Image: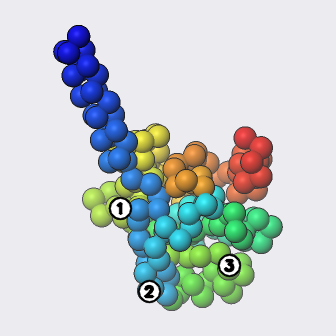
Amino acid sequence: MKTIFLISGIIIMTILSNAQNTKSFYDFKTTTIDGQTFDLSILKGKKVLVVNTASKCGNTPQYEQLEQLFQKYGGDKFTIIGFPANNFLSQEPGSNAEIKEFCTKNYGVTFPMMSKISVKGKDQDPIYHWLTSKEENGVMDAPVKWNFQKFMIDENGHLAGIVAPGTSPMTEKIVDWIEGKN
């Protein structure tokens, strides 16, 4: 009987230890496109749509839909964060200042944009390592397939799902998620 309690105790401690090792989205800090530190923990309680962006991609017009989504739902319960990345066919070659000017001038982007990062490979940014690795996020492996892949983060900082790069940000899957219908 003592052995059963001991084994049960070890199993419970292992489960709790593993649960505590799983990071949430809020455990990361990043850098804004203007070079300021951005602590993702300030987004606790909000749903967050994370998107890797590029200025010279066939999906670039999605900036317009992302901004529409942000204007409609952005606030206390939802936000969008754009992470420019040059990982796919050099479709984001500009500097942070050039990217910011492009997004503002051409699409009126007002949602938060971060500094250009790498979303895959040996120099992958830690936040994207977390987003794409089940070992890190505790939910799924979700490698970035192209520019404008969308990651849905729930109010508790957990990965809630992904949406393919070519899919509109205004898709029912995202809108229903924001509105709490799924």
Q: Earlier in the sequence, mark 1 or mark 3?
A: 3
123 left or right of 87 in image: left
**Position in image of residue 30 (x %, y %):** 42, 73
Q: Position of residue 20 (x, y in %)?
A: 35, 47
- How packed mark 1 is, by other alpha carbons closer than 10 Å (few <14, some 14-19, many 20 or more), is some
Taking 132 as reference, is 58 above or below it?
below
Q: How many neighbours does mark 2 have within 10 angstroms: few (below 14), some (14-19), or many (20 or more)?
A: few
Please tell me which of labels 1 and 2 falls first in the chain: 2
The residue at which mark 1 appears reads as 126
Q: Amino acid at mark 1?
A: Pro
* Element carrying mark 2: loop
Using residue 55 as the reference point, say whether residue 11 is left or right of it. Answer: left
Label 3, on which residue?
109
Q: Residue furthest left?
A: 3
Tag 2 near tag 3, CB within 8 Å? no
Looking at the figure, which quarter contains the C terminus?
Answer: top right
The numbered dot on residue 35 is 2
